[in-house]
Structure formats: structure tokens, C-alpha cells
Amino acid sequence: QVQLAESGGGLVQAGDSLRLSCAVSGLTLNRYTMAWWRQAPGKDREFIGRSNWNGGGTNLADSVKGRFTISRDNDKNTVYLQMNGLRREDTALYSCSAQRAFSSGPQYWGQGTQVTVSS
């Protein structure tokens, strides 16, 4: 059974940093592209970025470039989202997804972890 479990969210002040983790079980991580998403209340889910499978690097949305980075540890089956310089508009439920290589669209999703940024 595949499980994705996000952690690391919380209440922080603007300008602070947080590192989110997505612990994965039930699949071989290096065969999956792992992505981070967020959804703020009343808004559509927003793509933040991805860590491509097989060492294919990362891609980030323009809205977070220069502030957020994505990394993975395949040995630990964990993907990370490092968030620096947090802003109030970063407040959202953050979740991760797993997409099998050569497939279209994520097959698996986590439940998410809440990040709240106060001014």
C-alpha cells in the first residue's frame, strides 16, 4: 500500500523558514516524479514544483522561485520542500504527490500539512 505523509507545517511569521517533509512508503522513490502543491482557502490547488525521477533535476513555479527549493533522499524515501522568506500569501495546505515515470498525472497523494504565515 502506497502512503505519502507530509509533515513540518505550522504557524510562522513572515520572513521565517520551514522545511516540509513527504515520507513515502510502498513505492520505489527513484522511479517517481515527486511534486509539491498547495491550496489556500477558496482557491484552486497550485503547483509549486517537482523533483523529477531518475535524477532529472527540479522545476519550480515562478511564484516560489528563489525562495523555495525541492530535494529528495531516495535512501530515506523522503522528499523535502525548503521554504524561505515566507509570506502571508504562502498560507495554504501543502501536499505532495507521486507520479510514476512515463505516466501522465500523479497516481498518489498525501493528506497535506498546514502552513500558516502571520505578518
Image (cartoon, grey):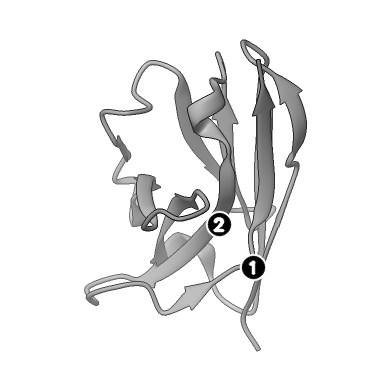
Above/below status of 95 relative to 102: above
Taking the image as shown, residue 98 lies to the left or right of residue 82, namely left
Give the alpha-carbon distance from disc 1 to disc 2, as whole Å. Answer: 6 Å
- The amino acid on which the numbered mark 2 sits, given as a three-letter code, is Ser
**Quadrant in the picture for the N terminus:** bottom right
Above/below status of 80 relative to 4: above
- Reading the image, the residue beneath label 1 is 111
- Residue 26 % position (x, y): 64, 79
Q: State which quadrant residue 100 falls in.
A: bottom left
Residue at point 62% right, 81% down? 2
**Mark 1 and mark 2 residues within 8 Å of each other at the beta carbon:** yes
Check disc 2: other Cα within 10 Å, few if <14, some if 14-19, many if 20+: many
Nearest the viewer among 40 and 76 is: 40
- The amino acid on which the numbered mark 1 sits, given as a three-letter code, is Gln
Helix, strand or loop for disc 2: strand
Taking the image as shown, residue 118 lies to the left or right of residue 73, namely right
- Residue 38 % position (x, y): 48, 50
- Residue 94 % position (x, y): 57, 50
**Quadrant in the picture for the C terminus:** top right
Q: Residue furthest bottom?
A: 1
